[in-house]
Image (cartoon, rainbow, N blue to C red):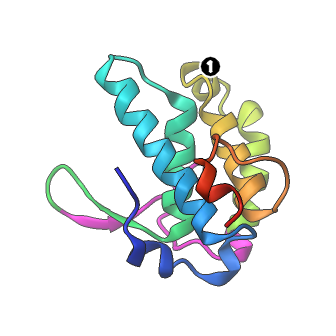
Amino acid sequence: MGVPVEQVERIPAGNLQVPRAAFAAVWAAAQSRTREQGERGIQDWYAAGVVTTCRWLAGASHRTSWGLVQPSAAPVTRSRATAYEELIEAECLAVELLPLRQPDLVADRPGWREGIRATLWWAWRGEGPPPLDLPRQADTS
């Protein structure tokens, strides 16, 4: 399951500090991992955190179960505002404070916070490795 090229091309330039191809590869890998784990009855909160963060950074919309198309929510604050520089930085702060503000959520979703944080630090701040291993061809893009 890939990420639509047109969606990747529409990502605001200021939202990423990594190559679009690498971002798309991580996003697709996280979606694939989430689907595969779900088919085995496993809730992979780490991969789900990566997917949610990628969708929000990309400004992707999604269709609700009742058919409404709406923008993706920010992974921590749940804001429906489209991601832009100041909001992304605020989300970075919010993920750091999550254990203090919502300890039950952190406990109930093991890996969720870590997936969000790893994605934000890599994609937005350009720090650290990708949150998931990249396919070989996307490593150098």
**Which residue is disc 1 drawn over?**
107
Q: Is residue 18 visible?
A: yes
Residue 35, x across and y down, in percent: 35, 35
**Residue under the image location 54 percent in, 20 percent down:** 108
Residue at the image position 49 percent from the left and 80 percent from the top: 9
Residue situated furthest right in the rendering: 127
Name which quarter of the figure residue 64 lies in: bottom left
Q: Position of residue 134 (x, y in %)?
A: 62, 47
Q: Quadrant of residue 92?
A: bottom right
- Magenta residues (range): 68-87
Q: Is residue 65 left or right of residue 126?
A: left
Name the outermost residue toward the left: 66
Residue 79 lies within the magenta run:
yes
Left/right of residue 89 with respect to residue 30 in the rendered view = right
x, y (%) of residue 104? 60, 23
Label 1 crowd (10 A; few <14 / some 14-19 / many >=20): few
Residue closer to the observer: 9 or 112: 9
35 in relation to 22, above or below:
above
What amino acid type is highlighted by mark number 1? Ala
Number of marks in the rendered image:
1
Confirm whether the magenta stretch covers residue 132: no
Main SS class of the magenta portion in the image: loop
Nearest the viewer among 23 and 125 is: 23
